[in-house]
Amino acid sequence: MTDRMKKNPGEETETAKKPSKKKKSSSGRPARSAEKPAKASPGRKKAGSSKPKATQSASDRRKDAGASAKPAPEQIAKAAPGGHSANHLFSDYETMATYVAELQEKGQGILSGMVDQHAAKGRNKVQAPSDPLNMQDTMADVFTNVFSDPYNVMRMQFGMWEDTARLAESMVKKATGNDVDPVAEPHAGDRRFAHPAWTENQTLDYLKQSYLIQCKWARELVNKAEGVDEHTRRKASFYMEQFLAAMAPTNFATTNPEVIEEAMKTRGENFLRGFRNFIDDMERGHGELLMKQADMNYFKVGENLAMTPGKVVYQNDLMQLIQYAPTTDDVATRPMLIIPPWINKFYILDLQPDTSLIRWLVAQGRTVFVVSWVNPGSDLAHKSFADYMHEGIFDALEAIEKATGENQVDTIGYCIGGTLLGCTLAYMAAKKDERIQSATFFTAQMDFREAGELLLFIDDQQIANLEKQIDAAGGVMEASAMSKTFNMLRPVDLIWSVYIDNYLKGKEPKQFDLLYWNSDSTGMSKEVYLFYLREFYQSNRLSQGELVLDNVRLDLGRVKIPVFMQAGEKDHIAPPRSIYRSARLYGGPTRFMLAGSGHIAGVVNHPDRRKYHYSTNDALPETMEDWVEGATRHDYSWWPYWMEWLNEVSRGTVPARVPGDGKLKVIEDAPGSYVKVTTV
């Protein structure tokens, strides 16, 4: 948090300590002060400090407001969603004036940024589509089919009316002091309605249950639509969930008891702070709202993130190669190469010392190399998937041999980096290239038949729209667009809870390393992005042995090296069933392991944290259901289990290797400069 954020603007103005002169109204009479009544009631004791208001500082007045104590939940339950007296909110006018002046100044920069951004896109002579995900046509198809059957519509309508009538009846009973069971309840994991006021306050309780009843009706409307194909129905269901998440009563200041409580505590300053946060996010996005999920000023890559010691020993247009410094006297004979996804930055594997997979691997006696992908600009829009194989993996293998003298390595591929690694293994098998001797995959798909909710964004119309969007951005899929897509997979947690905290409560973004990494996203070149969508998600060619890369047909069945496949139980980006199908494509000894949690926490789970669990089964039967039935569950991290496997397939030790001691000279310290390039 910056010093400017820590201070209240009112504390920085000298005028806050001086009495202000009374202004005259248009009638010539002195204007009535908003901070004290025109006439005090007889015998009424004045609240707050004994100091005269005119000589109190803005800071003192805020302390006085806080001295009345934070409202108890039962107070909010009684007050919400009713209004508060006008002289209670925004009573610190000097603070308000400071905010307004700051916002006006920033507003000019935002308008200038918007003009520049639109001008840049105009120079590309391509108009980005207004509906790139084709939501309008999808919902139109569903509603046309729904309302073509009046009987079905009336049946669903009567069902909603019945639930609404039951709710009204229960509210009458509740008002007369009777205990009643709710007609509609949020699911167990829904934290939006956790505040006691949603149950204790009858108005809020009614509003909550009405919303849940309408959600039930809207979902049924989509699910019962006749005459639409399953892909269209799933898309419509996804888009409906976005709408329902947006319309939740928790997203509105007057119906969110937590926001009302914050307004009472701060005398309305939360709204000013929230608007400033909104303006800051607009300024950061040059006129486009880029919502901060974490404090973007607190974290610095290389200072309090990605701190494992190492050196950049090689670089080209697409990547820097980092070699990490050893912490053991001896290391495994074969070096290890990590290929992370280029959708995000590699330091998810090196966030903090106590969670870092990279640091842990070094401590296990591994010579670790990591590819740090470039954040591409329009000059790299032509780079292809085959270029990422040649300039990413193959150039890294050559550099590792120069740095260590070893021409055989162990590898790790994470997410799309794992998909690239799988393609590379099939390519190398066809070429009889044996430099990679083992492969570990973290949530990496090769078979995309059951690739989860991301499949909803992949059809001909959507890809055509995305291509126009990329062309309008200069040939690169913008990082903000990628980030929004992933946030839509969890709209309540990654969009609307952030909206409430940042803009309604006026909170400063959290100092949370994982959310910072999530916001520090990257773009993707047009050629790579469209190839990925069409060849993998849409056509699923790799799993069918039909994918051709650099004139070589790829067959994963020809890959005979040991393979370890990790999946996450709750992974919504690379679902475990999809990973299991992928594991069965390889022709050599393959081990599948199912970790607790999802796409990130299922991977980054340091043993010292003693969290989650994992399941193992050395067999690889035809279905995942059969695998689960024969699996054994274990507590905590899967890393030691995986290291046992790795030590079995990668034997032998040599004296530790120091970056720069081989034929490659040091370019700069880790984490390098490529990872520090941001898009905003």
Image: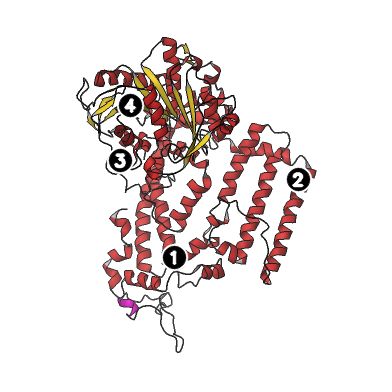
| Quarter of the view holding residue 501 | bottom left
Label 2 secondary element: helix
User: Which numbered disc, 2 or 4, marks the residue closer to the eye?
Assistant: 4
Identify whether 35 is placed above or below 281: below
On screen, residue 62 versus residue 504, left or right, reads left
Real-space Cα separation, disc 4 to disc 3, in angstroms: 17 Å
Label 4 secondary element: strand
The C terminus, quarter of image: top left
Name the residue beneath numbered marker 1.
Answer: 268
* Between 392 and 325, the one nearer to me in the picture: 325
Label 1 secondary element: loop
| Quarter of the view holding residue 364 | top left
Real-space Cα separation, disc 2 to disc 1, in angstroms: 44 Å
Name the residue beneath numbered marker 3.
Answer: 301
Name the residue beneath numbered marker 4.
Answer: 319
Name the residue beneath numbered marker 2.
Answer: 153
Q: Residue at x 52, y 43 (%)?
A: 490
4 or 3: tag closer to the N-terminus: 3
Disc 4 to disc 3: CB gap under 8 Å: no
Disc 2 to disc 4: CB gap under 8 Å: no
